[in-house]
Image: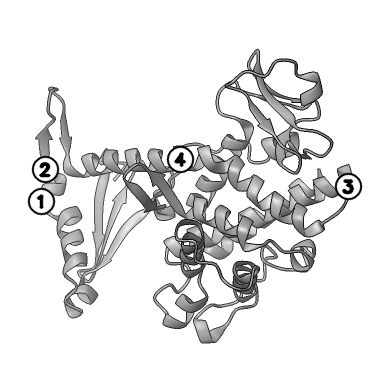
Amino acid sequence: MRGAVLHWGIITNGRRWRLCHAVAAAPYEVFLEIDLDGLLRENNLSEFLLYYLFFGQQAFTTVQLKHTNAQQIGLDRFLEESEKRVDVIQRYLRSQVEPILQSLCLGFVQDEAAGSYTRETLDEIYRNTIFLLYRILFLFYAEARGLLPTQDANYQYIGLAGIVEDARLHQQEGIHDPDPFSLWKRLTHLFVVVDDGDESVGVRPYNGGLFSDREKPYLKTHKITNAYLAQALFELGYMQRKAGIYPVDYCDLTVRHLGTLYEGLLEYRLNLVSQEPVVVRENKGNRIYIPRSQAGVVKRTETILEVGEVYFADDKGSVSLAGPTILQRTWCSILCLTQFCQSYWNAASYWKHCLSIYNMK
């Protein structure tokens, strides 16, 4: 394809049809494959329409674009629309990263139930929160890509999609489980299933350490209540718009560029508002956190964090606002990472390796 200067090509044996994009960032891992023999056998009309749309003549036919003199084939048009959709998803998730981390950190702070929190305790909470977030993101990605048996009825009973749906019911409809830790118990059970494997639900074991309690004993001995975990899972699972909520399709996320994955995590630290409220103020391109007694006049546009809330800042108590925040760049890198991984076991191994480097810093 590249030798012939072709962007798109089809590989088929007559039964399976694979659409390849030669200029994709990872062309050997990123493709659309349809089992034509299987969908005809099952009389799957929706899959056949997908096959017709992407492998039919119109997909390779050049059309004139409206309001321009440019020409574009159908597949390039589909790709452009897909990239717009991905951009919307990524921008939404980047905007939610700090609230999500705050919810998870507050859950662990409440579980610690300490009268005061040392710097070491807050750092440990933050490290384990990041590790927990990676586990959850991995499960979102693996289920969206079909790397976990989401069609298996037994797996559906324990899978992440069901847990996130119950989180939605908790957040939107006020349906609360009598057990305040029900979501945490189900989520950590899923971690064990992925780590050890379970033939009854169609999951083979992964022993790479990402889901192992031996790697992170803190996540075994501590827990987060539904009040905090439901909020984080809901914001990870759904995009909120004026017209309603829409599930986030992690399968659609693609690589734009790989940032420095741990740059932000090494620079930020978890801080707990403990003595008095803190004023969040923007000054010369930085967001700074000032004790209320030292802040002077508080503007209407400024936020006041009450005692018991958490925030993320460097050792100087500030965050740079020049361009995307470090947390946002880190988030984007997390979401894009697995595009380069052919299987979820390889992806999880890579994530676990990177996390080990972070913990050594």
Q: Position of residue 92 (x, y in %)?
A: 45, 40
What residue lies at 71% left-to-right and 42% top-to-bottom?
309
Label 4: which residue? 92
For the question of whether residue 353 can be seen, the reply is no
Who comes first in sequence, dot 2 or dot 3? Answer: 2
> Tags 4 and 3 in contact by the CB under 8 Å rule?
no
Rounded to the nearest whole Å, what is the CA distance between mark 1 and mark 3? Answer: 68 Å
- Give residue 54's quadrant in the image: bottom left
Rounded to the nearest whole Å, what is the CA distance between mark 4 and mark 3? Answer: 35 Å
- Residue 150 relative to residue 102: left or right: left
Rounded to the nearest whole Å, what is the CA distance between mark 2 and mark 3? Answer: 67 Å
Crowdedness near tag 4: few (<14), some (14–19) or many (≥20) residues, C-alpha within 10 Å: some
Out of 171 and 95, give the one closest to the viewer: 171
- Residue 257 relative to residue 19: left or right: right
Who comes first in sequence, dot 4 or dot 2? Answer: 2
> Tags 2 and 3 in contact by the CB under 8 Å rule?
no
Who comes first in sequence, dot 1 or dot 3? Answer: 1
Disc assigned to residue 61: 2
Label 1: which residue? 57
Label 3: which residue? 116
Mark 1 falls on what kind of element? helix
Out of 39 and 155, give the one closest to the viewer: 155
| Foreground label between 4 and 2 | 4
Mark 2 falls on what kind of element? loop
What residue lies at 19% left-to-right and 80% top-to-bottom?
41
> Tags 2 and 1 in contact by the CB under 8 Å rule?
yes
| Foreground label between 2 and 3 | 3
Q: Amino acid at mark 4?
A: Tyr
What residue lies at 67% left-to-right and 71% top-to-bottom?
207
- Give residue 11's quadrant in the image: bottom left
